[in-house]
Amino acid sequence: MLRLQKVSKIFNKNTVNEKVIFDKFDFTIEEGEFVVIIGSNGSGKSTLMNLISGKTAADSGKILIDGVDVSNQLEHVRAKQVGRVFQDPLMGTASNMRIYENLAMASRKGQKIGLKWCISKKDIDRYRDMVKSLGLGLENHLNTKVGLLSGGQRQALTLLMATMQKPRILLLDEHTSALDPKTAGIVLDHTEKIIKENNLTTLMITHNMNDAIRLGTRLVMLSGGKVIFDAKGEEKKNLTPEILLRKFSEVEHCI
Ligand SMILES: Nc1ncnc2c1ncn2[C@@H]1O[C@H](COP(=O)(O)OP(=O)(O)OP(=O)(O)O)[C@@H](O)[C@H]1O
Ligand SMILES: [Mg+2]
């Protein structure tokens, strides 16, 4: 469903700060897989998501979604197929707009905004039901400006917005790491629910080993722009934080 073929990415090419992040990197994700990505700081996890979403252009290689080469598609064009939630709760929503306005924008992602761009009573009812399902009491505050919400409420809302149009791929970049443990748990529960209900193909980055083991159908460890561990099925189920930490230390020995 998603395929990276021989993708290379070098930052600051031909300067003293040149950094090769990916060198002819191959990676495939099947339809409906929920891939959890772990790896040390700087191992290329966010860059991988940036390459998939089109935020960062690859130097060479191909990125295919459903067999179609999207390598040259701009980020806003690819956004119709790619939903994304970042670590920073301020990034996925517009602070000065109300909850219902943010949802209306998300539901029209990829469409031109014209004079007929209006929000009906039916839309509002639909948004109310959607935010009610989050269980955060936001359904009575659809008029509230998003800037007034807590980080957890914003991330939950961003998750709704990123999945409203059922993306082909959902990218979650440490989307609960800025939240307190209780709120992170609530947002993760919603994440699992939304992914299951919509059978979304998902990539999630986390530094939390317990979440990495508990969630997802496949676990991938990145190091220096390479996949150094890839587990699914029984192998994934049998993982423990100790096993993963051992793998991390093995890599550090190699460097
Ligand atoms: N736009 C950029 N220009 C130059 N270097 C960059 C750029 N983006 C990322 N890098 C570098 O590429 C490397 C990989 O960064 P990336 O953000 O993908 O790491 P990561 O695995 O997501 O790390 P973390 O766990 O800290 O989020 C880092 O050394 C980073 O400094
Ligand atoms: Mg990152």
Image (tube, rainbow, N blue to C red):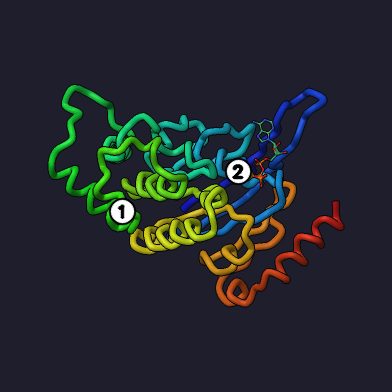
Q: Amino acid at mark 1?
A: Gly
Q: Which residue is mark 1?
A: 137
State whether residue 189 appears in this view: yes
Looking at the image, residue 100 lies above or below residue 244: above
- Marks 1 and 2 sit apart, C-alpha to C-alpha, by 32 Å
Q: Which residue is mark 2?
A: 46
Say what secondary structure mark 2 lies in: helix
The image shows residue 77 at horizontal and vertical percentages of 40, 33
Which numbered disc flags the more N-terminal residue, 1 or 2? 2
Q: Residue at x 43, y 62 (%)?
A: 189
Of residue 44 and residue 97, the one placed in the foreground of this image is: 97
Q: Residue at x 48, y 36 (%)?
A: 91
The image shows residue 150 at horizontal and vertical percentages of 43, 45
Q: Amino acid at mark 2?
A: Ser
Labels in figure, total: 2
- For label 2, being within 8 Å of ligand 2 is answered yes
Query: Quarter of the image holding residue 242?
Result: bottom right
